[in-house]
Image (cartoon, rainbow, N blue to C red):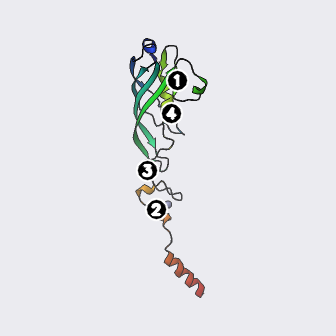
Amino acid sequence: MLLELGKIIDQPGGVVPFSCEMDFSELDFGGSRPASEPVLAVGQVRNEAGVLVFTAAVDTVLHCVCDRCASPFDRPFHLDAEAILVQELMDEQNEDDRTFLLQGDAADLDEIITTVFVLNMDSKFLCREDCKGLCAACGKNLNDGPCSCKAEPDPRLAVLAQLLKDKE
Ligand SMILES: [Zn+2]
Ligand SMILES: [Zn+2]
């Protein structure tokens, strides 16, 4: 979606509000597609002393799969995004992921919101911070309790076994 900014480009103090719904359900993050629900972006572009400042609150609910224990879980996602919109990119802004080029007199909301969303997505999804994960040996979800194969042999029994062995 293009947001027409012609009327505020030369008008300090001018504001153009917007509200849009994005579909990021096809966005792949390391094999999972957590943004299966619509992503809502509500914000404005404001001319602050000649600089076009984009601000938006981006909200959705992510449907994630835990990287450690593979359990599905939901997590609210909220991001306060800010960007600068320019008519021409200076050299040093080419690499800057917070500066976006206008398309004529309009802001390309799809490009801006997609970029800030992807840059702020977690690189890891954990159902909880102290998720214990799965047992490497038997695959049991250790959040549900310890598994039997993980039990260490009792050190006292090991000593006894050694004594008995020495007697032979
Ligand atoms: Zn987990
Ligand atoms: Zn186990």
Disc 1 residue type (three-letter): Phe
Whether disc 3's CB lies below 8 Å from ligand 1 is answered: no
Q: Nearer the viewer, mark 2 or mark 3?
A: 3
Q: 78 or 90: nearer the eye?
A: 90
Question: Which residue matches tag 2?
Answer: 147
Q: Locate residue 141, reporting x and y percent.
A: 45, 55
Disc 2 residue type (three-letter): Cys
Question: Which residue matches tag 1?
Answer: 100
Question: Which residue matches tag 3?
Answer: 129
Q: 34 or 10: nearer the eye?
A: 10
Looking at marks 3 and 4 on the same chain, the residue that comes earlier in the sequence is marked by 4
Q: Locate residue 74, reporting x and y percent.
A: 40, 41
Assess disc 4: are there few (<14), some (14-19) or many (≥20) residues with their C-alpha within 10 Å of its C-alpha: some
Disc 4 residue type (three-letter): Val
Q: CA distance from mark 2 to mark 4?
A: 38 Å
Looking at marks 2 and 4 on the same chain, the residue that comes earlier in the sequence is marked by 4
Q: Locate residue 145, reporting x and y percent.
A: 41, 59
Q: CA distance from mark 3 to mark 1?
A: 35 Å
